[in-house]
Amino acid sequence: MEVVPFEPQMAEQVIGLWNRCIGTHYPLTERLFRQNVLGDPFLQREGNLVALEGKRVIGWVLSRYLAEVPSELASYKGHASIGALCVDPEFRGRGVASALYEAAEAFLRSQGAKRISVVHYPYHLTPGVPSEAAGLKAFLERKGFGGWRETYDLRRQLVDYEIPTEVEKRLREQNPKVVIRPAREGEQKAIVEFVGREFPGGWHYDTKRFFEKGGDPSDIVIVVENDEIIGFCHTFTPESIELRGSTHWFPLLQGRWGGLGPIGVAASHRGRGLGLALLCYSVWHNKQRGVTDMVIDWTDLVDFYGRIGFKIWKRYWQGQKTLE
C-alpha cells in the first residue's frame, strides 16, 4: 500500500469508494465530485491523497489549507481542514486510515496550520462528520480531535405546504410596505452588496460566486421595503446552476427536489416577523416551481424551521484538533 496524490483519472474509483463506504446515506454523484472537489479553486494536490493497493484506490483523504483567499473569505485565511476520509471496507483494520490521516496532517503542518477542523468550507461535501460515520468520529478522537458540536440538515415534503394564514396576516397588517418576491434580472449587484454588508464572509462569497457563474436571480427571494433590499433567501431546484449543501444528496429525495439556504434579514429590520415570512414565502416559491421534497442544510435552528414542519433529516459532528 502506498499513499500518493490524487490524479484526475482516479475520479471514478474515488466516487465508487465513497459510495461503498457511506453512499447509502450520502450518494456522491459525479456532478457533485466535479463541482466541489475537482472544481475547488483552493484544492491542493498535496492534500488530496489516495491510498493505492496496486492500481486500486482503497482509501481517500481530502485536506486543504487556505493560504490565500479572496477578500470575502478573509476570516477563513489560514483555515486547515479535512473534508473527507474513507477506506474501502475490505481493507479496514490495516492502518490505511492512519496512513492517510498522518500524511494529511503532515501536509497541513507544513503549510503552517495551527489547528485542523472537520468543517471543510468552502466547497464542502458534508458540513462535518456524518452521524452515520461514528467510527470515523472515534478514529479522529484517537487522533486528538474534540470540541464536538452538532449541526443538522432538515427536510420536508411540500405536498401539504401552505403559507400559514397568521404569517400572511401579520405581514399585511404590520408590514404593509414590504414585498417578498423572487429577484429579477438586473438586481444581482444590489443583492451581492446587501449580503456583503449584512452577512460578510461565506454567504457573501457564495452569493457573489453564484452570480458570477450565471445563476438565475429568481433562485433568490428578496424582501423589499421602499425600494430597498432588507432580506434574502437562496432557493434551489434541479434547474439551479449548481448544487449546494441543501441539494448535495438529491438522489435520496422523492419527486422533484429542492433546497433552501442561506436566509437572512438585515439587522436593523429584525424583530418584525420578516424572517419567518421570508422563510414561508421562499418555501412557497419552491412549491410553485414544482418542488415536492425540500432540504434546509447546515443549521442548528431546528425550532425555527420546525414552525413550518421541517424536521431533522441528517446530523453531523463538527470538531477540531489543535496542533502543538
Image (cartoon, grey):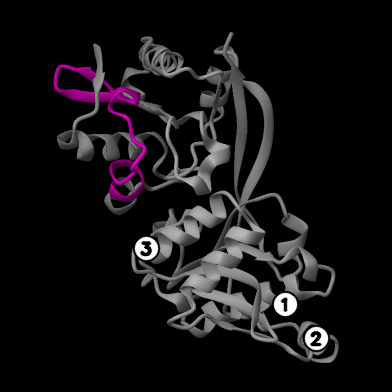
Task: Give the amino acid type for the residue marked by disc 2 in the picture.
Answer: Asn
| The C terminus sits in image quarter | top right
Could you tell me which residue is drawn at 66 percent across and 60 percent down? 198
In front: label 2 or label 3: 3
Mark 2 vs 3: CB contact within 8 A: no
In front: label 2 or label 1: 2
Q: Where 311 sits versus 289, above or below?
A: above
Mark 1 vs 3: CB contact within 8 A: no
- N-terminal of the pair, mark 1 or mark 3, is 3
Mark 2 vs 1: CB contact within 8 A: yes
Q: How far is the residue under mark 2 from the one under mark 3?
A: 33 Å
**How many residues crowd mark 3 within 10 Å: few (<14), some (14–19), many (20+)?**
few
Q: How far is the residue under mark 1 from the one under mark 3?
A: 28 Å
Could you tell me which residue is drawn at 46 percent across and 60 percent down? 208
Residue 212 tag number:
3
In-front residue for pair 52/239 = 239
Residue on which the image places disc 2: 175
Residue on which the image places disc 1: 277
- Left or right: residue 202 compared with residue 225: left
Q: Give the image location of residue 25, x and y in percent.
A: 46, 46
What is the span of residues highlighted in magenta in the rendered image? Answer: 34-60
Could you tell me which residue is drawn at 24 percent across and 12 percent down? 2
In-front residue for pair 55/299 = 299
| The N terminus sits in image quarter | top left
Q: Give the image location of residue 58, x and y in percent.
A: 27, 23
Q: Give the image location of residue 187, x and y in percent.
A: 49, 78
Task: Give the amino acid type for the residue marked by disc 1 in the picture.
Answer: Ala
